[in-house]
Image: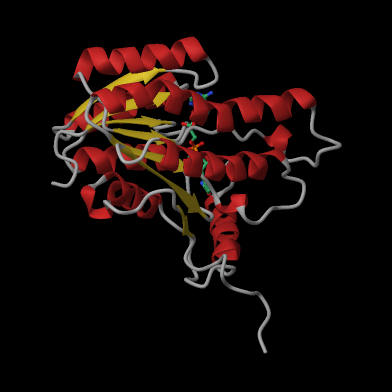
Amino acid sequence: MNLQDKVSLVTGAALGFKAGGPSIGSAIAFKFASEGAKVVVVDINKEMGQRTTDQIVQNGGDSLFIHTDVAKTTEVKQAIQLTKQTFGKLHCLVNCAASYQRNIFRNVVDIAEEDWNHTLDVNLNGYFRFAKYAIPLILESGGGTIINISSGAAFKVLKNFSVYPVTKAAINALTRTLAIDFAPDIRTNAICPGFVRIANSEGDRSPEELRLWLDGIAKTYPLQRVCSVEEIANVAAFLASDDSSFINGECITVDGGRYVSDYHEF
Ligand SMILES: NC(=O)c1ccc[n+]([C@@H]2O[C@H](COP(=O)([O-])OP(=O)(O)OC[C@H]3O[C@@H](n4cnc5c(N)ncnc54)[C@H](O)[C@@H]3O)[C@@H](O)[C@H]2O)c1
């Protein structure tokens, strides 16, 4: 297996909060475990984070859940310490945790300063904090990889959704700076998904409303469907493995060709 005995830490790896539905981080944790990695699951959601770990263990894998708020330096440091105590090493960090509450769907005039700052602190500074405190352990472990889950929003913005793209564009810049500062020991890359179907964004839609919503989004994608969390996890596993051994500093768009497509027809 490609990640045999590699120790990896995935932030934002809890299953979806309602009934344990799909999330990108948990799909990455499951995929890594299926490839033989030991997986540290990090999330602010205790119940669903523990559920991700339990599921890995039930399937014969090795996993530890560490309840952590990525916005708190002491908790981030503690997560790295616990990883070291439990597994001795760390080979791969996947930064994936992000918060997007309804109150950030605003332009710069309407968004509250505290919501802007909170989003920067979780979605961007959380990635910085984990990189800062994980890198020494990755170097001590003989090197490895960092994968930052970014977004297509780093390149194209949505109306009245101001702070989120700012964090994602900065994550791409962070990816490039880590890629050159810590090469050749650590390769750092980002994944920029388009719309990915996850439990947390489905809200309280009825099955029919959900079908109409997803069909509407799918129509804007050349592949005529939306992305699954597993399709992002597959790319993360590739970037964590030696199969991608000469890829460093890339921000890889995984959106079924939406970014390179235009809407009108001749
Ligand atoms: N779903 C999409 O369409 C999509 C598209 C592009 C990029 N992304 C990115 O993918 C990543 C994963 O998101 P997702 O779509 O799976 O959503 P999600 O809501 O299922 O996952 C985000 C996770 O981060 C956790 N989290 C939030 N605040 C935290 C904090 N302070 N400390 C620790 N954990 C915290 C949440 O509990 C949740 O488990 C995010 O970085 C997101 O921006 C998602």
Q: Estimate the x, y position of residue 6 in percent, counting from the top left.
A: 20, 34
From the viewer's perspective, tell me whether residue 84 is left or right of residue 227.
left
**Residue 4 image-quadrant placement:** top left
Residue 21 seen from this side: no
In the displayed structure, would residue 70 be above or below residue 1?
above
Residue extending furthest toward the bottom: 266
Q: Residue 54: horizontal and vertical position, in percent?
A: 26, 26
Q: Nearer the viewer, residue 99 or 206?
A: 99
| 213 shown above or below 74 | below
Q: Quadrant of residue 16?
A: top left
* Count of all numbered marks drawn on residues in the image: 0
The structure's colour scheme is secondary structure
At x 56% / y 27%, what residue is drawn?
125
Visible residue check, residue 173: yes
Q: Is residue 38 left or right of residue 122?
A: left
* Quarter of the figure that contains the C terminus: bottom right
- Image side of residue 134 versus residue 44, left or right: left
> Which residue occupies the foreground of this view, 229 or 177?
177
Q: Residue at x 34, y 53 (%)?
A: 247
Q: Residue at x 17, y 32 (%)?
A: 61
Work out which residue is located at the far right of the displayed protein and give it. 109
98, 87: nearer the viewer: 87
Find residue 258 and report its horizontal and vertical position in percent.
Answer: 55, 66
Q: Is residue 85 above or below residue 235?
A: above
In which quarter of the view is residue 264 placed? bottom right
Residue 53: x and y, percent? Answer: 28, 27
